[in-house]
Amino acid sequence: PTWGDTGKSLAEMDIDADFAEHTKPWRLPGADQSDYFNYGFDEFTWTTYCLKQKSMTGQLADQKAETTKFE
Amino acid sequence: PTWGDTGKSLAEMDIDADFAEHTKPWRLPGADQSDYFNYGFDEFTWTTYCLKQKSMTGQLADQKAETTKFE
Amino acid sequence: LYLHIDPDFKRPPCPHFERGFCPLGPRCANRHVKMEKICPFYIAGFCPNGKQCKEGHHAKFVDDLPPPEPKIVK
Ligand SMILES: [Zn+2]
Ligand SMILES: [Zn+2]
């Protein structure tokens, strides 16, 4: 799902840049990370996961481009 | 030890819950799915959801293992 | 005048049902609080709205729950 009118999925968003206006309550001391992050993620591991996903889809697109070149 | 104030032992409880899992009363004609499944889940979508939970927590564990390797 | 008190009202919510599924269904000793849907952002992994979210419930997948208890029928 895309977030608000950004047209981006949360996995595609840069928490620092795209949520500059957001109060980021998950960063407050004592905040329960699991209210915001599912599967045991926190902001750090979630960011790493998103970057990894992005690079993987990038690789897949490259591979596809490579294969279609020879079709 | 008894569980809560029901006066039943945990072992007896296990049997009841397991019995229900085994007999799958939600499959019986006339059963209201929403008494068993929340959020509009049914047996199939619930199973898929559980697999997603497993896969995501697994990916996070792998990611964490990978990060500590390089520390 | 009789004040009707729903006996269900006193029962605590069932954590299994809150998670998504309870095999005991109507036989469960705890209250099954029906909710419409899980937040799609939370399912994706992250939703900045936390408890205030209007997109759906943030259902935590707790995996160390005690087994559900059946209702004692008198
Ligand atoms: Zn229950
Ligand atoms: Zn949400």
Image (cartoon, coloured by chain):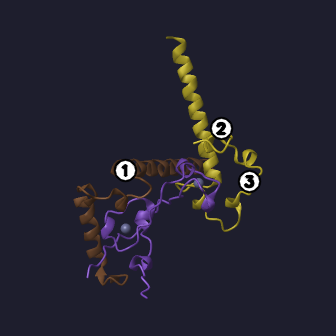
Chain colours: A yellow, B brown, C purple
Q: Nearer the viewer, residue C22 or C33?
A: C33
Q: Secondary structure at mark 2?
A: loop
Q: Of label 2 and label 3, which has the lower sequence position?
A: 2
Looking at the rendering, which quadrant does residue C16 occupy? bottom left
Q: CA gap, disc 2 to disc 3? A: 17 Å
Disc 2 crowd, CA 10 A, few/some/many (<14, 14-19, 20+): few
Q: Which residue is mark 1?
A: B47
Q: Amino acid at mark 1?
A: Thr
Q: Secondary structure at mark 1?
A: helix
Q: Quadrant of the N terminus of chain C?
A: bottom left
Chain letter belonging to callout 2: A
- The image shows a total of numbered marks equal to 3
Q: Amino acid at mark 2?
A: Gly
Q: Residue B67: x, y in percent? A: 59, 48
Tell me the tag on residue A22: 3
> Which quadrant contains ligand 2?
bottom right
Q: Nearer the viewer, residue C2 or A8?
A: C2
Chain letter belonging to callout 1: B
Q: Secondary structure at mark 3?
A: loop
Q: Residue C56: x, y in percent? A: 54, 55
